[in-house]
Image (cartoon, grey):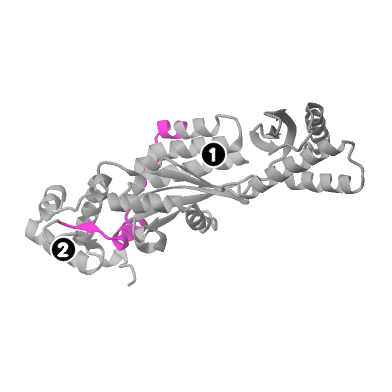
Amino acid sequence: MAITPITELTDRARDVFRTVVDSYLASGVPVGSKTIAQMSRLNLSPASIRGVMQELEELGLLASPHTSAGRMPTDRGLRLFVDGMMQSLEPSAEERAAIEARAGGGGPVEEALAATTAALSGLSACAGLVMVPKREVTLRQIAFVPLSGTQALAVLVSEDGAVENRVVALGAGMTPSALVEAGNYMTATLAGLTLAEARARVEREMAEGQAAIDGAARVLVERGLAVWSEDGARRPVLIVRGQGRLIDAAAAADLDRVRDLLDDLEGKQEIAGLLDSARAGDATRIFIGAENKLFALSGSSVIARPFRGLDGQVVGVVGVIGPTRLNYARVVPIVDFTAATLARLMG
């Protein structure tokens, strides 16, 4: 069924509909005709308002969960509200400062992305999401630290300052000097290369007999690169922060929905696929409830916007996920500002 154009609603119907939506988004509970009569400026009786609400229900814009419970907007109704009636509220100076402070905190890019996403989560009272492509690590320094006679800690420092540690199994007879030799060789030979480039160079030099290291160190170099390369292939592309904010007082009465939503967040590949669909274009995308089959059970909404680098190419997508009754007018501009901030960070 097509969404009813906002222009086809009478002024009275639009006023009643807006009041129902505003009240529901603020409280999370269905709204009755008496409440509308007190809030509306139309000076209508509760009986007249009930008639209008019935018409809106027949159009698929409102629904009544129980016979005597009042009305709440449907997913179709929320879509009509978001697309045709919502008046956005610009982020406050404090909200902008909070996001910029997290993005400009320094350190590895992943930490800045995670911190910014956490700030977005706190400001929106939703779970914050950011998706970026799998990143190629560029090497700066490599070292091997002995842990025992059979294991060593491989320490990788990337060009952006990130430090990653991996445990590597040692072969029989591996000496401390071999660990130092392997680290010195990798730092001197492979600095400035990505993992894929480094592995290709090591394989080529060893095949051509050009690697100036002995057999034990050679084995250690190969194992270290194999461990990092395998892990890099599984590097997560989706960061989620603030899941706990989804469990609020209103959600306590609907724990099944919250459980379904948290299950959705565990399926990161599905969420990443949804965010990926928001990469095209420059506009913010809003996915409401059952409009997307992923959220048919949990009744959730996603607000997402792509952000671009200096070359104009899409770098990633940032957004939030929360119940369909989230404050769209406030959250959409916050997501937009976060996307612009991340674009400056990634540029």
What x and y, as percent, mark residue 163? 65, 32
Under mark 1, the amino acid is Leu
In the displayed structure, would residue 259 be above or below residue 50? above
| Span highlighted in magenta in the image | 70-97
* Observer able to see residue 125: no
Q: Which residue is mark 2?
A: 52
Under mark 2, the amino acid is Val
Measured in 3D between alpha carbons, the distance from the residue under mark 2 to the one under mark 1, in whole angstroms, is 47 Å
Q: Any magenta on residue 89?
A: yes
* Observer able to see residue 119: yes
In the foreground, 258 or 26: 258
Query: Which image quarter holds the N terminus?
Result: bottom left
What x and y, as percent, mark residue 187? 79, 33
In the foreground, 309 or 151: 151
- Residue 152 quadrant: top right
Q: In the drawing, does residue 84 fall left or right of residue 268?
A: left
Any mark on residue 147, and which? Answer: none
Q: Secondary structure at mark 2?
A: helix
Any mark on residue 113, and which? Answer: 1
Q: Residue at x 16, y 51 (%)?
A: 40
What x and y, as percent, mark residue 104? 55, 31
What x and y, as percent, mark residue 278? 50, 56
Q: Secondary structure at mark 1?
A: helix
Q: Residue at x 7, y 60 (%)?
A: 47
Of callouts 2 and 1, which one flags the residue occurring earlier in the amino acid sequence?
2
- Residue 246 quadrant: top left
Q: Residues within 10 Å of mark 1 (few under 14, many from 20)?
A: many
Q: Residues within 10 Å of mark 2 (few under 14, many from 20)?
A: some
In the foreground, 58 or 264: 264
In the foreground, 64 or 224: 224
